[in-house]
Amino acid sequence: MAHCVDPGFRIPVLHPTLRIVLTPPNIADGRDVVAALNDPRVYMNLNGPPYPYTDEDYWGWYEVVEEAARTSSEEMQTIKRSSKITQDAEQNAGGCQTRWAGRSWWVSAIRELRSERSDTGEETKFLGEITVRRSNFLYILDEAERQKKVYENNSLEAGDPKILWEVGFYLIPECHGRGIMPMVLQH
């Protein structure tokens, strides 16, 4: 399903043959997400989503990722302001530098940019999704120990190199083997 995306939050991804952008999830992605997460070439490689994946599952997930995307957008604006502060600080002795990384989790839809129109915005095709968040330590079976690790990890200040991260992602099957995800992970 192609649709228009707000260009205010987009990250271009370098790819040798496709025009890829990362954007916030869009409510209109539902049909594509449900189709992808019910395809064995996708769901057999995932830990989290239920199978079969239903429209109701998508609506529940969308509520969560929409809020995460909103927070991510706000934090990206902070990064942009911080970059300006850092540039000013480097030019002016006594300036301060702001660190940022990981106040919340980050989620993005992966899209192919099909066309750019000044009257209607960008036309894109949904290709997949990526999330980055602090680890939930799901591999630790002892619940008390797992909760302790989650608390310790979440207590680390944003930007601390000791933060442990989890990355979740998938692509629609026709995009497998095209070098898309390695390029997305570099951004």
Image (cartoon, rainbow, N blue to C red):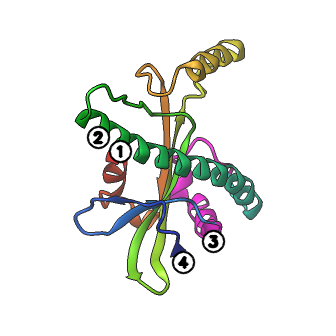
Query: Does the CB distance between marks 2 and 1 fall below 8 Å?
Result: yes
Which residue position is annotated with label 3? 28
Judged from the image, the secondary structure of the residue bearing numbered disc 4 is strand
Percent from the top left, x then y, of residue 16?
22, 64
Amino acid beneath label 2: Gln
Query: Does the CB distance between marks 1 and 4 fall below 8 Å?
Result: no
Choose the circle earlier in sequence order: 3 or 2: 3
Choose the circle earlier in sequence order: 3 or 4: 4
Q: Residue furthest right?
A: 56
Query: Does the CB distance between marks 3 and 4 fall below 8 Å?
Result: yes
Density class for disc 2 (Cα within 10 Å; few <14, some 14-19, many ≥20) is: some
Which residue position is annotated with label 4? 3
Q: Work out how far the residue at label 1 is from the one at label 4, CA to CA, in angstroms.
A: 33 Å
Amino acid beneath label 4: His
Q: Quadrant of the N terminus?
A: bottom right
Of 83 and 96, nearer the camera is 96
**Circle 3 or circle 2, nearest the eye:** 2
**Circle 2 or circle 4, nearest the eye:** 2
> 115 above or below 65?
below
Which residue position is annotated with label 1? 84
Q: Work out how far the residue at label 3 is from the one at label 2, CA to CA, in angstroms.
A: 38 Å
Which residue position is annotated with label 2? 87
Amino acid beneath label 1: Lys
Q: Which residues are magenta?
A: 27-50
Residue displayed at 74% across by 54% down: 60
Of 97 and 176, nearer the camera is 97
Percent from the top left, x then y, of residue 35?
60, 66
Q: Residue furthest front?
A: 93
Percent from the top left, x then y, of residue 177?
33, 58
Judged from the image, the secondary structure of the residue bearing numbered disc 1 is helix
Of 137 and 96, nearer the camera is 96
